[in-house]
Image: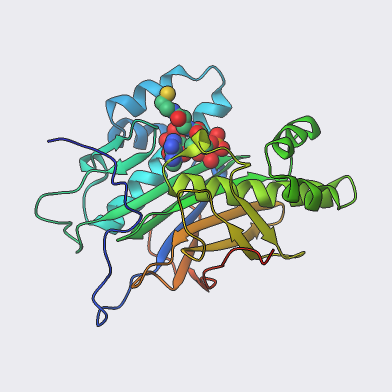
Amino acid sequence: MTLTAPESLSAGPAPRHETVPPVKLWLCPNDALPPAIAAVLASRWLDERENKTAARFLFERDRRQYLVAHTLVRRALALEAGLAEAELAIWRSSRGRPFLQPLPGGLPRGGDHLDFNLSHAGGYSLLGIVRRQRIGVDVESLEREARALETILSTFTPEEQLWASGAPVGRQRDRRVLRLWTLKEAYSKARGLGLGLPFDEFSFSLADDRGVLAFRPPADDLAGRWRFLELEPVPDVLVAVAVPADEGSAQHLELHHGFPWDRAAPHTIALPEPVGAPQD
Ligand SMILES: CC(C)(COP(=O)(O)OP(=O)(O)OC[C@H]1O[C@@H](n2cnc3c(N)ncnc32)[C@H](O)[C@@H]1OP(=O)(O)O)[C@@H](O)C(=O)NCCC(=O)NCCS
C-alpha cells in the first residue's frame, strides 16, 4: 500500500444531516502516569520505532515525557477508533507528521478517518483528535529561558514582534511571545509542515487577554479558513489548537484532563468563528 500524506486540509464536507463529532483534546501531566505503569504500557502498546526512540533518550526525564505522550496517543486513539492500542498502525510523512493508517473497512467505532496531533513540553502532553479534517496542537509552559524566548521572538513577523515587545519585560512579554508561538506551531502542525513553514510568512493579531482577532495566512493558503482556540487549562500552561473551518467541520471541542483510563466527563468548549485577514 502506498502511504502518502493527504495534502488536502479536509477529508471532504460532511452531509448536512449528520451531527458533527467534536474535536477531542487530551491534556495529560506526566504525573498522571506513574513511571512503572508507563513502562509496562509502552512495552505492550508501542511499535518498534517508538520503542527504539524511547531507548535513545539520554535523560530519564525525557524518556518519561516521551512514554507518557505516546501511551496517551495510543490509548486515546484506541478509544476513539474502537481498536486495541497495539493494533493501531501509525506512520509518518516525509516531514515527520504522524498519521493513523486508515483501515480498508473503516473504523470499528464508525467513520474511516481520524486525524491527530501531539505536543509535549514542560511535563505535559497534549493530544488533539478530529474526524474528517486535520488538526494541529501545541502546548508550552511559561517557564522558558529568556534567551530561548528572544530567539523565538526573532522568527516572528515585524508586526508580531512589535506587539509582543509592547508588553513589559517579564511574565507579560513572555506570555505574548508564547501565545504567538503556540498558535504558529498549531497552524503549521495542522498543515503538516512543522518548522518547515517559516514563521515570518504568516501572522496573528491577538486580543490582549485571549483570542485571535485576525490571521494573515502564508501565500499558499486563504484567510478565513481556520478556527483557532487558545486555552490556559492549567495556570502558566498555554495551549493552542488549529482546525480548518470547512463546511461540516466541528463546532465544539471536548477538553479531557489526565490519562484516558475511563470516559470521565470532559469540559465542552465552543470553537471560535474562523478569523479573516487583518484590515490594512
Ligand atoms: C513538528 C515540530 C514543529 C515540533 O516542534 P516541537 O515544539 O519541538 O514539539 P511538539 O512537542 O510541539 O510536537 C512534537 C510532535 O509533533 C508531531 N510532529 C512531528 N513532525 C510534525 C509535522 N511536520 N507536522 C505536524 N506534527 C508533527 C510529532 O507527533 C511530534 O512528537 P513525536 O516525535 O514524539 O511523535 C518540529 O519538530 C518540526 O518541524 N519537525 C519537522 C522536521 C522535518 O521537517 N523533518 C523532515 C525530515 S528530516
Residue visible at 14% across and 56% down in the picture: 106
Q: Is residue 16 left or right of residue 246?
A: left
Quadrant of the drawing holding the N terminus: top left
Vertical side of 235 occupied by 53: above or below: above
**Would residue 34 appear left or right of 168 to someone viewing this image?**
left
Image height of 81 relative to 143, above or below: below
Quarter placement of the C terminus: bottom right
Q: Is residue 38 visible?
A: no
Viewer-closest of 90 and 4? 4
Q: Horizontal and vertical percent for residue 46?
A: 31, 33
Q: Residue at x 52, y 56 (%)?
A: 241
Where does the image place residue 76, in percent across and percent down from the top left?
A: 36, 52
Outermost residue on the front side: it is: 280
Residue in the picture at 38% in, 45% down = 73
The picture quadrant where one finds residue 207 is: bottom right
Regarding residue 53, the answer to whether it shows in the image is yes
Number of numbered markers: 0
Residue 149 screen position, x and y as percent: 75, 37
| Snapshot quadrant of residue 79 | bottom left
Q: Nearer the viewer, residue 159 or 170?
A: 159
Residue 181, horizontal then vertical, whole percent: 64, 46
